[in-house]
Image (spheres, rainbow, N blue to C red):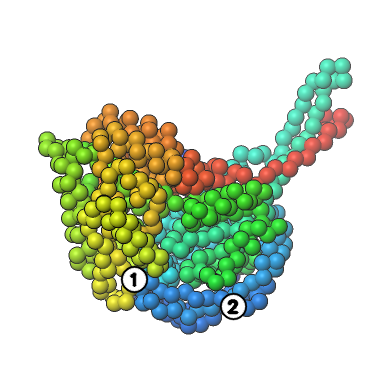
């Protein structure tokens, strides 16, 4: 059934109001179901989702879009190590950009409220395929099922709706008309009638990452659509399926709302024939949203000065462990973060800075060595049981991460560092061929920054012996400022120490989470509340989500003319 945008605007007005309120209060709110429990969704939905995923395997992915010049697709599951066997349309970039620009003509005629209604309708349509999307994300990114369901489902959609709300907020600040008058003295009062039109920048290219294909994509997609821009999504070559499914569902929703589906398009490629640079260098590309490696993100920032560029790249995330009134809870939360999704999240902790004098735990002081042993023991508790390891560590997305583990181990031994815990594969109870790895833990001295001074996208933890707790903060903040950090962590029972550390990390442009324990994932980033990336250090230039993420995606054209004197208006 076709629904007019004005009807969708009315239907979803309460959702828009609630999202705007959440942005203003920074409180928790979500219209989406985060749990895959059959008690929430019904008994048949989990099995139906698996069946829908399996039906996609070994088949061409049917998506009707312009400029098809062949097929691509060589995705391999991190769980089975076997190809998915799915092929996707390979599209001519010129055709994609041409279709996207044409699709914008009618889209920009809608009011912001109508565009919000259509985008909310998209979001709920995307939630409908949460179960099949979870399996698609598992077998491309390597996430565990629960994380894939929420992290690429409800949590990702929350981030998308947050961007939608901020885009609406930015546009609502511009009046559509105004009456202006000024007394020019001898010539008298001049009255003008003014009007203002919001115009989009143009076509946006959204470059998705391998491990979280939708969590960063949805904010970019909805920020662009809400401000009138068309979107071309470029997925990672081993993460096409979740993005292709999302593109197809969004195109279906647009068509049902009487809009041109070419507002959202897929540009799939393969490792051997990448097209990212061709897309972002295309003359019709106006906006680039990029998630991925810091090296390529920096290249985009430096080589695309005539585009509007938003990046979220890498973080050398630090932990400073000074003291704690509940060290078990602190180390438990830290161990969960070190193991979670095999540390393949941009918020995963990596460097644990500990003073050589040890850590105060209540009325006692735990030595550096004993503290490191407690961290290792906590990791072992979480990885010795294959079922627990599978739920927490999931699978390693790419062989390159295993290569990194081997490389870091060799460099650590060559430099005299101590291996506290060897990385090993674990036997996944459901997928015996899964690519798995538990954390490698290395003890290093503070001056061995060549080992720990940049992000290693793999389950690797460096425990750093610092001269003092103050120097631990200084070193961690300096690395964040110079090399990038998305999330940093501090454990201290000393309020003065906490406040001093907050000052130092603020100077470094790095966010800091204090005394996060094992009651929740310490690196969870909440939509409407947590600002993800500050834009003040090399980990990225954009924040999910603030007004700066959306406000420059549209510009303002104005018209003015005198009010006829005889009307008095």
Left or right? Give the position of 237 relative to 225: left
Q: Separation of disc 2 and disc 1 at Cα?
A: 27 Å
Where is residue 35? Give x, y as percent. 34, 62
Mark yes or no: residue 339 visible.
Answer: no
Of tags 2 and 1, the one toward the viewer is 1
Question: Which residue is label 2 attached to?
Answer: 71
Q: Residue furthest bottom?
A: 58
Q: In which quarter of the image is the N terminus?
A: bottom right
The residue positioned 45% from the left and 78% from the top of the image is 84
- Residue 324 to residue 35: above or below: above
Mark yes or no: residue 402 visible.
Answer: yes
- How crowded pointer 1 is (Cα within 10 Å; few <14, some 14-19, many 20+) is rated as many
Name which quarter of the figure residue 529 lies in. Answer: top left
Left or right? Give the position of 82 relative to 202: left
- Residue 425 to residue 524: above or below: below
- How crowded pointer 2 is (Cα within 10 Å; few <14, some 14-19, many 20+) is rated as some
- Residue 131 to residue 120: above or below: below
Where is residue 196? Give x, y as percent. 72, 41
Where is residue 177? Give x, y as percent. 72, 38
Residue 134's label in the rendered image is none
| Disc 1 element | loop
Where is residue 33? Give x, y as percent. 39, 60
Question: Which residue is label 1 attached to?
Answer: 435
The residue positioned 59% from the left and 62% from the top of the image is 276
The residue positioned 52% from the left and 46% from the top of the image is 542
Exactly how many numbered labels are in the figure?
A: 2
| Disc 2 element | strand
């Amino acid at each position: 059934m076709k629904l007019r945008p004005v009807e969708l605007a009315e239907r979803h007005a309460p959702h828009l109001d609630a999202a705007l309120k959440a942005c203003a209060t920074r409180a928790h709110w979500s219209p989406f179901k985060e749990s895959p429990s059959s008690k929430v969704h019904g008994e048949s939905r989990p099995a139906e989702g698996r069946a829908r995923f399996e039906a996609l395997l070994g088949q061409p992915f049917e998506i009707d879009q312009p400029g098809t010049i062949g097929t691509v697709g060589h995705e391999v599951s991190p769980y089975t190590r076997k190809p998915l066997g799915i092929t996707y349309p390979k599209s001519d970039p010129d055709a994609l950009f041409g279709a996207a620009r044409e699709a914008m003509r009618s889209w920009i005629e809608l009011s912001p409220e109508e565009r919000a209604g259509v985008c909310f309708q998209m979001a709920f349509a995307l939630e409908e395929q949460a179960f099949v999307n979870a399996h698609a994300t598992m077998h491309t990114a390597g996430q565990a099922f629960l994380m894939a369901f929420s992290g690429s489902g409800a949590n990702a959609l929350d981030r998308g709706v947050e961007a939608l709300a901020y885009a609406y907020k930015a546009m609502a600040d511009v009046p559509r008309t105004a009456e202006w008058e000024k007394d020019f003295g001898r010539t008298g009062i001049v009255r003008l009638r003014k009007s203002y039109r919001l115009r989009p920048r143009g076509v946006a290219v959204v470059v998705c990452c391998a491990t979280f294909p939708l969590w960063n994509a949805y904010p970019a997609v909805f920020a662009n659509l809400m401000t009138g821009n068309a979107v071309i999504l470029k997925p990672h070559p081993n993460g096409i399926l979740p993005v292709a499914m999302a593109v197809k569902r969004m195109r279906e929703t647009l068509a049902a709302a009487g809009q041109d589906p070419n507002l959202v398009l897929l540009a799939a490629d393969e490792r051997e024939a990448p097209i990212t640079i061709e897309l972002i260098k295309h003359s019709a590309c106006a906006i680039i949203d990029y998630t991925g490696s810091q090296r390529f993100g920096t290249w985009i920032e430096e080589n695309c000065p005539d585009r509007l560029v938003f990046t979220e790249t890498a973080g050398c995330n630090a932990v400073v462990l000074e003291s704690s009134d509940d060290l078990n809870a602190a180390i438990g939360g830290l161990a969960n973060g070190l193991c979670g999704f095999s540390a393949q999240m941009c918020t995963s902790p990596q460097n644990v800075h500990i003073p050589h004098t040890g850590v105060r735990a209540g009325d006692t002081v735990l030595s550096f060595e004993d503290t490191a042993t407690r961290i290792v023991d906590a990791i072992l508790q979480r990885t010795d049981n294959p079922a627990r390891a599978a739920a927490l560590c999931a699978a390693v997305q790419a062989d390159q991460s295993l290569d990194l583990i081997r490389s870091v181990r060799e460099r650590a031994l060559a430099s005299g560092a101590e291996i506290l815990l060897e990385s090993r594969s674990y036997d996944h109870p459901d997928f015996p061929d899964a690519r798995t790895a538990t954390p490698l833990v290395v003890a290093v001295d503070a001056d061995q920054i060549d080992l720990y001074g940049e992000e290693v996208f793999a389950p690797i933890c460096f425990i750093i012996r610092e001269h003092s707790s103050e120097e631990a903060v200084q070193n961690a903040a300096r690395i964040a400022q110079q090399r990038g950090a998305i999330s940093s962590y501090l454990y201290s029972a000393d309020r003065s120490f906490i406040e001093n550390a907050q000052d130092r990390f603020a100077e470094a442009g790095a966010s800091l989470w204090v005394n996060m324990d094992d009651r929740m994932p310490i690196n969870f980033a909440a939509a409407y509340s947590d600002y993800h990336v500050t834009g003040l250090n090399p980990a990225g230039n954009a924040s999910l989500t603030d007004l700066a993420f959306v406000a420059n995606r549209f510009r303002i054209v104005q018209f003015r003319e005198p009010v006829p004197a005889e009307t008095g208006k």
